[in-house]
């Protein structure tokens, strides 16, 4: 019997889909093992984990681990620091990134632009460890550059790694120094799509450079600014582990201004408080989920074309 | 009059940029300078942009017993190369079915991928999985397998595949090409720029990996380069231990400051010299992120 046309077609489709399934398989297996299996491990957050009894054998203890964290002094400090830095970085990244992109945009010489661009992007190639080295060159209490400069003005040496109040500024400057080049590229790429005739028209109408920037150039950047802001708000309760762990060198005296949720959970893991660390991690995951969905929902209501999904 | 004003603006811009260049270059020059400085002069005068007393002592010490540095180099090069190759290959293949309208499981698979962006089990469950169940700690695989595939990169690749004209794939099918053949011989070659950018970003992140060693590695020969650097920077004891295996001239002080930076130079220098040439790909990879999935 000759197969009908539709039968042959569905045979082809079935074979195609078999091949497509095979192509998805290796990646899907990796996602299942390294992303989905750990999700099952979340039960540890509700248990009194004992390594000898294993995950399933350990006793349930309800919300005790969460209670332990949220009623501790550390919770206020750690959550407060995380959110504070996230908000500062969000604002500073926006201003510095757009500012630098505008500087690039107004530069005439393309050769100079390429050179400056390469230089400011350089730190993005460096690991947190090297960044910590560089900060240490500046802040080393006995030999560092900062104290050297202060000495020129007759100001006595400052013990940078002993006083917590200096660190919000130090970490913010380090963060900006490291990331502003990369941030600006996203905005600069967007400016490449700006129609120059708009600026010429504004100039003909008598707008000066400043007015052109405020009324023509910056509005063009708003969609990109919205997307980066949604993403940043989704990360409100987490921070750059490398920056906060390496640069302050994990010094206990500085924790009051340098300890964030990521460094806290890491220390809890190293000290063997696995169930507490899991509980805080779960809190972080859930808040992240709610914040991304929430901001995205709001943005979709106001201007659907700017939403992420 | 007007021309003069515009020139002034450019001059101001260039001066601002030059100040930035100084702020970005000087720290690197300091590392170089300190590594070539004499230890006693460092202790007496502090760090300087130009060595007060030039010395190769720190480098002599580093190279007198380079076993640990070489081991870390080998480990880092090995896992960076293998994982970058595998990541590009696996994600390059996986993105293809997700870009095809005729793939039946597209919905569920896409959801499975996207959900990992929104929620994760966190650090401890991953840690237990890797150490207690998969026993990957103290093996090179712990650097390679976790984090090989990521939703973010997959979406970027898929979006790029989708932008290819559909006729291209239909024509190949009429000529009798199978899905695998189309993916390898048509789609992936055409999307080489994106795969290169993703691969390059992945490579940089792997090269800079220090926290994997911190959590999972206790064997010194498997330390990643960045982890080795971290221990040198933060642990005076470790520094001494490393140096004692090297030859130290009898009555001399141990040049701990310059030794640190010489080590940093040896570990990071070659990479810093190479990276600017790849900057083009790097920038491209970053702007790709702006494409909506």
Image: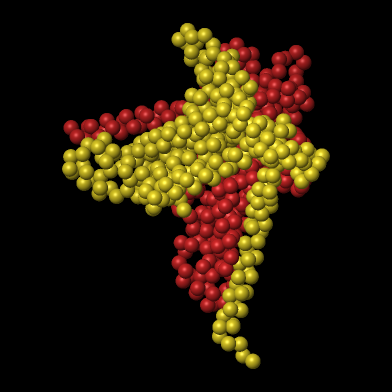
Q: What residue is rendered at 58% in x and 39% in y?
A: A284
Q: Measured along the vertical axis of the image, is residue B172 above or below residue A194? A: below
Closer to the camera, A24 or B132?
B132
Position of residue B231 measured from the top left corner of the image (x, y, whole percent): 68, 29
Task: Give the quadrant of residue A258.
Answer: top right
Closer to the camera, B216 or A75?
A75
Position of residue A69 measured from the top left corner of the image (x, y, whole percent): 63, 31
* Quadrant housing the N terminus of chain A: bottom right
Q: What residue is rendered at 61% in x and 74% in y?
A: A14
**Does the rendering let one see residue B85?**
no
Tell me how many marks there are: 0
**Does the rendering let one see residue A285?**
yes
Q: Measured along the vertical axis of the image, is residue B78 above or below residue A64? A: below
Colour seen for chain A: yellow
Q: Measured along the vertical axis of the image, is residue A140 above or below residue A71? A: above
Q: Residue furthest right?
A: A52
Task: Give the quadrant of residue B175.
Answer: bottom right
Q: Measured along the vertical axis of the image, is residue A25 above or below residue A84? A: below
Q: Residue furthest bottom?
A: A1
Q: What residue is rendered at 73% in x and 22% in y?
A: B237
Colour seen for chain B: red
Q: Would you say A290 lies left or right of B233 here?
A: left
Position of residue B191 measured from the top left corner of the image (x, y, whole percent): 51, 59
Applied colour scheme: by chain
Q: What residue is rendered at 79% in x and 39% in y?
A: A51
Position of residue B221 measured from the top left corner of the image (x, y, whole percent): 75, 37
């Amino acid at each position: 019997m000759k197969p009908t046309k539709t039968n042959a077609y569905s045979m082809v489709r079935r074979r195609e889909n078999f091949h497509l399934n095979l192509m998805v398989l290796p990646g899907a297996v990796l996602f299942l093992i390294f992303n989905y299996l750990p999700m099952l491990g979340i039960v540890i957050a509700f248990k009194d984990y004992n390594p000898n009894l294993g995950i399933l054998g350990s006793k349930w203890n309800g919300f005790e681990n969460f209670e332990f964290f949220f009623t501790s002094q550390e919770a206020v400090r750690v959550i407060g620091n995380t959110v504070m830095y996230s908000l500062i970085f969000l604002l500073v990244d926006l201003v510095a990134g757009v500012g630098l992109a505008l500087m690039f945009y107004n530069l005439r010489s393309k050769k100079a632009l390429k050179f400056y661009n390469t230089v400011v992007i350089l730190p993005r190639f460096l690991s947190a460890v090297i960044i910590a080295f560089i900060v240490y060159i500046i802040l080393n209490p006995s030999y560092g550059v900062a104290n050297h400069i202060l000495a020129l003005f007759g100001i006595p040496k400052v013990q940078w790694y002993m006083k917590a109040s200096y660190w919000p500024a130090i970490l913010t400057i380090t963060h900006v120094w490291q990331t502003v080049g990369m941030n600006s590229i996203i905005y600069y790429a967007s400016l490449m799509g700006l129609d120059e005739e708009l600026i010429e028209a504004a100039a003909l109408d008598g707008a000066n450079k400043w007015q052109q920037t405020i009324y023509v150039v910056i509005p063009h950047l708003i969609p990109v600014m919205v997307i980066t802001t949604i993403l940043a708000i989704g990360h409100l309760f987490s921070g750059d582990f490398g920056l906060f762990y390496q640069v302050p060198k994990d010094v206990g005296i500085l924790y009051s201004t340098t300890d964030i949720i990521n460094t806290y959970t890491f220390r809890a893991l190293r000290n063997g408080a696995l169930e507490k660390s899991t509980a805080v991690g779960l809190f972080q995951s859930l808040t992240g989920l709610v914040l991304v969905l929430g901001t995205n929902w709001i943005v979709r209501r106001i201007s659907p074309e700017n939403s992420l999904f | 009059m007007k021309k003069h004003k515009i020139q002034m603006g450019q001059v101001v811009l260039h001066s601002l940029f030059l100040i930035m260049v100084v702020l970005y270059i000087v720290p690197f020059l300091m590392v170089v300078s300190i590594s070539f400085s004499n230890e006693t002069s460092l202790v007496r005068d502090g760090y300087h942009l130009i060595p007060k007393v030039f010395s190769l002592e720190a480098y002599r010490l580093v190279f007198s017993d380079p076993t640990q540095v070489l081991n870390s180099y080998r480990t880092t090069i090995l896992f960076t190369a293998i994982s970058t190759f595998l990541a590009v290959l696996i994600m390059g293949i996986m993105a293809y079915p997700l870009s095809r309208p005729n793939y039946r499981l597209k919905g569920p698979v896409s959801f499975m991928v996207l959900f990992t962006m929104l929620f994760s089990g966190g650090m401890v469950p991953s840690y237990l999985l890797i150490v207690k169940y998969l026993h990957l700690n103290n093996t090179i695989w712990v650097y390679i397998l976790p984090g090989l595939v990521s939703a973010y990169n997959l979406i970027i690749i898929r979006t790029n595949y989708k932008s290819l004209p559909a006729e291209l794939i239909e024509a190949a099918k009429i000529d009798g090409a199978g899905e695998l053949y189309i993916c390898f011989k048509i789609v992936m070659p055409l999307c080489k720029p994106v795969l290169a950018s993703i691969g390059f970003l992945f490579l940089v992140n792997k090269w800079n990996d220090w926290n994997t060693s911190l959590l999972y590695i206790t064997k010194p020969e498997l330390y990643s380069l960045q982890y080795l650097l971290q221990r040198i920077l933060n642990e005076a004891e470790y520094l001494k231990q490393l140096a004692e295996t090297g030859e130290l001239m009898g009555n001399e002080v141990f040049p701990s400051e310059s030794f640190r930076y010489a080590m940093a130079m040896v570990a990071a220098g070659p990479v810093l010299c190479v990276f600017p040439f790849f900057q083009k790909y790097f920038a491209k990879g970053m702007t790709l992120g702006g494409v909506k999935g």
